[in-house]
Image (cartoon, rainbow, N blue to C red):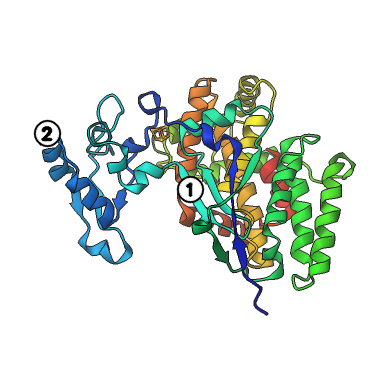
């Protein structure tokens, strides 16, 4: 039976959203300098063409902007060319945008004005979030020692919209997602155990009859009560297996080797004593667990023994990717597996990053690349997740290994 539409009348943002400022010239991994395609609409194209500009920028625009006749049908009318080094044609050596400096921010294509922000209607609200692929965002997460709060405000009437849930669970998206975030922020437990608690709750939800609204509501009540006393849960059977964790991290690293660009060799060297994948035989490679553990201690010291930064990162990812999907019980479990896989790789990469230099800037540099290779690459994210399903490794017991590092 089709569900009634939900009229969305509010906007939901993480409280830190309003504090975001691009750090421009101070950014180590400027988004205009990373080889990303900058494609935009006809409206953006005409705004750039018509803006008054100096002869120098006019010439630069002619050389740096190209029509995309073959992509017009899907709204991608033109693009900025990027140099062989991956730099946007308008990017100055100081890390600024020449087009913005001369013509103002309103002349930039939407993609440049908006990044790293995302806006999407869900069954909960119009949600605005920030991508963890931006160093300015990571700096905000670093400072939020108390965790992330959310703010919900009324939307102006012209922004109201109907959202059509596909089943009774999806009509409860706001409450279920809120429970996911509460589980991630349940500080009575270490972060890996929170992820396991989330797994237990999600597994229970997956097994319910989703057409039974009362059962869904009871599950929500019982889960909220459990979150009030998470330490009472017996999670002891979810044991750590460092060897398997490192082997999984190494496999993901090899899959992402090219996308991680200049950081990949360094991460590989931390666990294998080599920095190139050519000729690397996964079946024979020796993993250097001792070196990884030394790097792990450096990360703990850099974070001051606090998990708040990684917690904020996982909450941000959950919100940014609109997890969990409630299209079906299978999709729900896929969201959970996806989150565990992401946590596992972020943690693995963060530890490996410390081997060379235990500094915040180093950590951000690596995490920006991890985010760009996974958060902004849904195809690759799904492929890595699906591999776990194909290998019968999408069980809760395997998730314990992925997050238990
Ligand atoms: S990545 Fe973020 S902080 Fe860096 S230049 Fe882009 S928007 Fe600014």
**Which disc number belongs to residue 65?**
none
Q: Which residue is mark 1?
A: 118
Q: Secondary structure under badge 2? A: helix
Identify the residue shown where x is 67% and y is 33%.
147
Q: Is residue 247 visible?
A: no
Identify the residue shown where x is 56% and y is 52%.
155
> The N terminus lies in which quarter of the figure?
bottom right
Q: Are marks 1 and 2 in contact (CB under 8 Å)?
A: no
Identify the residue shown where x is 16% and y is 40%.
52
Image vertical order of residue 179 relative to residue 173, above or below = above
Q: Is residue 346 left or right of residue 68?
A: right
Residue 386 place in picture, x, y as percent: 57, 59
Label 1 or label 2, whichever comes before in sequence order: 2
**Which disc number belongs to residue 56?**
2
Local packing at callout 1 (Cα closer than 10 Å; few below 14, some 14-19, many 20+) is few
Local packing at callout 2 (Cα closer than 10 Å; few below 14, some 14-19, many 20+) is few
From mark 1 to mark 2, how far is it between C-alphas? 33 Å
Q: Is residue 18 visible?
A: yes
Residue 162 place in picture, x, y as percent: 56, 66
Residue 258 place in picture, x, y as percent: 40, 43
Q: Nearer the viewer, residue 245 or 187?
A: 187
How many badges with numbers are in the image?
A: 2
> The C terminus lies in which quarter of the figure?
top right
Q: Is residue 258 left or right of residue 231?
A: left
Image vertical order of residue 123 relative to residue 145, above or below = below
């Amino acid at each position: 039976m089709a569900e009634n539409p939900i009229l969305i009348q509010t906007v939901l943002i993480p409280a830190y959203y309003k504090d975001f400022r691009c750090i421009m010239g101070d950014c180590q991994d400027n988004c205009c300098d990373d080889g990303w395609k900058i494609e935009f609409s006809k409206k953006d194209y005409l705004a750039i063409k018509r803006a008054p500009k100096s002869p120098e920028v006019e010439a630069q625009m002619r050389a740096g902007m190209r029509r995309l006749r073959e992509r017009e049908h899907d709204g991608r009318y033109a693009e900025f060319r990027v140099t062989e080094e991956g730099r946007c044609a308008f990017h100055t050596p100081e890390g600024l945008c020449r087009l913005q400096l001369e013509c103002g921010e309103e002349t930039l294509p939407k993609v440049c004005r908006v990044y790293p922000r995302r806006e999407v209607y869900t069954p909960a609200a119009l949600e605005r979030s920030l991508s963890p692929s931006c160093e300015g965002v990571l700096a905000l997460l670093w400072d939020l020692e108390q965790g992330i709060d959310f703010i919900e405000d009324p939307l102006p009437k012209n922004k109201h919209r109907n959202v059509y849930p596909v089943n009774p669970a999806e009509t409860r998206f706001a409450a279920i997602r809120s429970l996911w975030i509460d589980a991630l922020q349940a500080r009575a437990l270490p972060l890996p155990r929170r992820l396991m608690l989330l797994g237990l709750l999600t597994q229970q939800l997956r097994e319910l009859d989703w057409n039974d609204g009362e059962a869904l509501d009871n599950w929500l009540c019982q889960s909220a009560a459990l979150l009030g006393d998470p330490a009472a849960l017996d999670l002891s059977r979810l044991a750590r297996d460092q060897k398997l964790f490192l082997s999984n991290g190494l496999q993901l690293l090899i899959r992402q080797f090219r996308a991680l660009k200049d950081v990949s060799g360094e991460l590989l060297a931390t666990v294998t004593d080599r920095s190139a994948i050519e000729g690397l035989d996964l079946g024979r490679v020796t993993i250097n667990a001792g070196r990884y553990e030394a790097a792990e201690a450096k990360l703990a010291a850099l974070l001051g023994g606090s998990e708040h930064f990684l917690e904020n990162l996982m909450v941000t990812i959950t919100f940014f990717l609109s997890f969990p999907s409630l299209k079906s019980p299978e999709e729900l479990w896929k969201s959970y597996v996806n989150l565990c896989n992401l946590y596992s790789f972020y943690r693995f990469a963060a530890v490996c990053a410390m081997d060379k230099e235990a500094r915040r800037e180093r950590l951000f540099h690596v995490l920006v690349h991890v985010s760009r290779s996974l958060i902004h690459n849904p195809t690759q994210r799904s492929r890595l997740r699906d591999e776990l399903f194909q290998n019968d490794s999408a069980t809760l017991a395997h998730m314990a290994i992925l997050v238990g590092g």
